[in-house]
Amino acid sequence: MVDQIQDSSIKLKRIFIESKLPEQLAPLQDLAHNLWWSWNRDAMELLMEVDPDKWEAFHYNPIAIIDQLPVERARQLLADPSYLEKLAQVSRMFQDYLDAKSKASGPRVAYFSMEFGLHSSIRIYSGGLGVLAGDYLKEASDCNIDMTGIGLLYRYGYFQQTISLHGDQINNFPPQEYTKLPMTPVRDKSGEWLKIGIDFPGRTVYAKAWMLPVGRIPLYLLDTDIPENSWEDRMLTHQLYGGDTEHRLKQEMVLGIGGIRLLAALGEEPEIFHCNEGHAAFMGIERLRQLMHQRGQSYPVALELVRASSLFTTHTPVPAGHDYFSDDLLRTYLSAYVAHLGIGWDTFLALGKINPYDGHELFSMSHLAIRLCQEVNGVSRLHGKVSQQMFKVLYPGYNYQELHIGYVTNGVHYPTWIAHDWHTLFIRHLGREFIQDQSNLARWEGVKAIPEKEIRTVRQQLKKRLLDYVRNKLRQDMTKRGDKPSAIFETIEKIRPDALVIGFARRFATYKRAHLLFNNLERLKELLNTVNRPVLVLYAGKAHPADHPGQALIREIIHISRMPEFVGKIIFLEGYNMELAKLLVQGVDIWLNTPTRPKEASGTSGMKAALNGVLNLSVLDGWWAEGYLANAGWALPLEASYTDATLQDELDAETIYNLLETEIIPMYFENGEEGYSSRWINLIRNTISKVGPRFTMKRMLDDYREHYYARLHKRSAALQKNNFTSANEVAVWKALCRERWDGVHAVEKEVFDTDNYSLNFGESFKVRIKVAHNGIPPQQLGLEAVFFKRISETELDLRFHRDLKVVDKNDHYVTFAGEILPQISGVYEYGFRLYPKHELMPHKQDLCLVKWL
């Protein structure tokens, strides 16, 4: 008899054990599911105390910690009356904060961005652009601005960086666990997950919507990784800045077109649309479609309405930061959309090209954004000028200096980036109310009265915290990648607690010149190896996976750091993220920034450092061109001395070496009566009181509200009044001007004979010009005399311009005249520029028709 064979295979069933906190601890869930905790110290400490040992291991993510909270630890918290009391207090504070949203002020703003840097556990950012966008939402929340954020949710986010034993960057893309992120599905009226459809060739791509609360601000994120889509389309929201040009186009369609459709599905009606970089420019196209097809407006009227309520912020002078697409690619994905829109293909191409009939010219998303936005701004004073140069091709007949492109210098969110040690000190000496008035420089004058010892104590505490972290991180990272134990011990042992610490941390794009300090290794060795004056240089940052020169630069720095003379003196820290950035900008002594001029649009890491009393050593580019003050940091000159990049690198490197050798290192190691450098403490005071406060996110948000949002809101409202009467008026008037402009010309000119005579200083330059207006109302024409100084064969410098007055007009002609009194003698080049004008135009370039007479 054969024994019956028993089935011995393991049989398992799945059980889901839902994380549910006891009622008294339930407010922890509410706190963890709103990022307000990430910039409120009391809330952060409460969440850290849930399980302090896991805080760093779980990437500072309270949801992940709460989800795995042991029963025994929950009982311990319940048995701690002081913890429960603090939880109740913070919970009330949080609820009061949220309740104030009903009193939100200003026009309703929709803020579109490809990335948002909110917290290191939410990997939907790559660098400065995203961190700025995240800081902006946080400040909008604190200031109770009526704002909504729109972005994409990336399954694998931007890569996490590790370094191989050979110094190579390894790009890791672990998936994000959405259940561990503070966001919830957006539901439609029937309770179903809200999905937005975007038309692609032969199919509809669907994106489901999530809502991530940033304090009082809802951030909506679109996610195409759902079963309704093909695998190719699901991948659209897998990685930030991944894939080829076609992939990027599809992502930007989801962001721009899908984002506007999401707002409509939510029933939200923003009054201002802020396009943060050109990635989101398709939002304007979708707004045109909705105005034309749902509101019955013509294309010209819809264009006026879209422009009047839109702002474009450009963030980079580097060509790689601007997206371009070919005609063929656009036809593949947008020809049906444009046909449905009801405008010709050439009309569409003209929005993103100089010449829509040139098949070789690529379609620029930045040009599209400019053409669909009334207002345009750069992100620092210098970058505003660089942007005028970059986009002058869009405004023929105007010198770049005259363009309406302005600037709002970037800022940083004070509560996110300030060290708690400083914040406590400031409250004690400046009063708690200074936080609400942080852009008021007068309040910061109180920093000068803070005793030197207290300032030095905070700086030493922050440096110790950083160096302790560096030692632990190096031990873990070097062990994991297989470095020899002797190398690990030697590196850590050589990190001196009394060292002058220099920090360089940012995206490893080659134009940022991370290599500059290594231009002369012999000179650098002498600077870093003086026995009684130890210096430590910390590097951190990522190179884009496709940026092979940037990755080679990281590898070079790591190889140099392993040379015997630089072990423990130069350190590259892998895995750069927002938490490491905080430790660095708070803990180093010097923040080094060496971009190629003028490629740094703004930069914000140095601002964060300045708020924390860290002194900047930087090229006068981006924000530092405005921020630099003598006795509050050091600067390399604004203008390049050489056209040869190698020679300029050599000069800048020598300048840095000399500053370190003759000023910075000696001053830092001065020993006064108290055993430290009072001069160094004075520089810290100046940096905190005079530099940092000028670059807060509060100031930046105030600037946008005052200089752009208010202006857009006023004009947009005016165009919409009385069933869009003014919008129709402007559209008809512009059509008339375009139709008749070729027939406008000068008939008579009476001008001082500058060919044969010079004008004596103090004499007036008299002008009288008669113009055939060809049916354009005379009062809607302007004529101005414009005077330039020639700088070179190709460059003119605008000196002044004067409007001429209408002195006579009839059905066919209009006569302008004026007397111009130059204020400074010299040789000028001048001309007379005729242009259309209208009381409803926001600026001259709103209708860029020009004739030089």
Image (tube, helix red, strand yellow):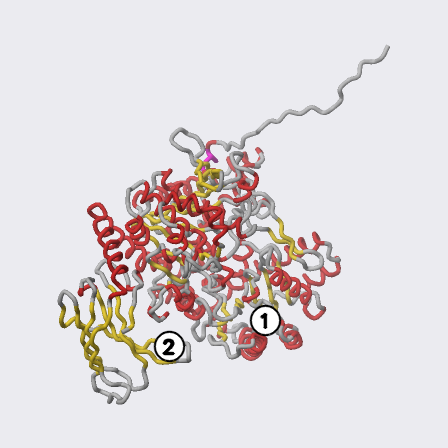
Crowdedness near tag 1: few (<14), some (14–19) or many (≥20) residues, C-alpha within 10 Å: some
Q: Confirm whether the magenta stretch covers residue 47.
A: no
Residue 283 or residue 393, whichever sits in front: 393
At mark 1, the secondary structure is helix
Q: Could you say which quadrant of the image residue 394 lies in?
A: bottom left
Q: Amino acid at mark 1?
A: Leu
Whichever of labels 1 and 2 marks the residue nearer the N terminus, that label is 1
Of badges 1 and 2, nearer the viewer stands 2
> At 26% from the left edge and 59% from the top edge, which residue is drawn?
739
Which labelled disc corresponds to residue 796? 2
Is 215 left or right of 643, judged from the image as shown? Answer: left
Total marks placed:
2
Mark 2 residue crowding within 10 angstroms, few (<14) / some (14–19) / many (20+): some
Range shown magenta: 24-28
Q: Which residue is mark 1?
A: 516
Query: In the figure, is residue 316 to the left or right of 559?
Result: left
Residue 48 vertical placement versus 782 (above, below): above
Taking the image as shown, residue 666 lies to the left or right of residue 109, namely right
Q: Tell me which amino acid carries mark 2.
A: Leu
Residue 27 drawn in magenta: yes
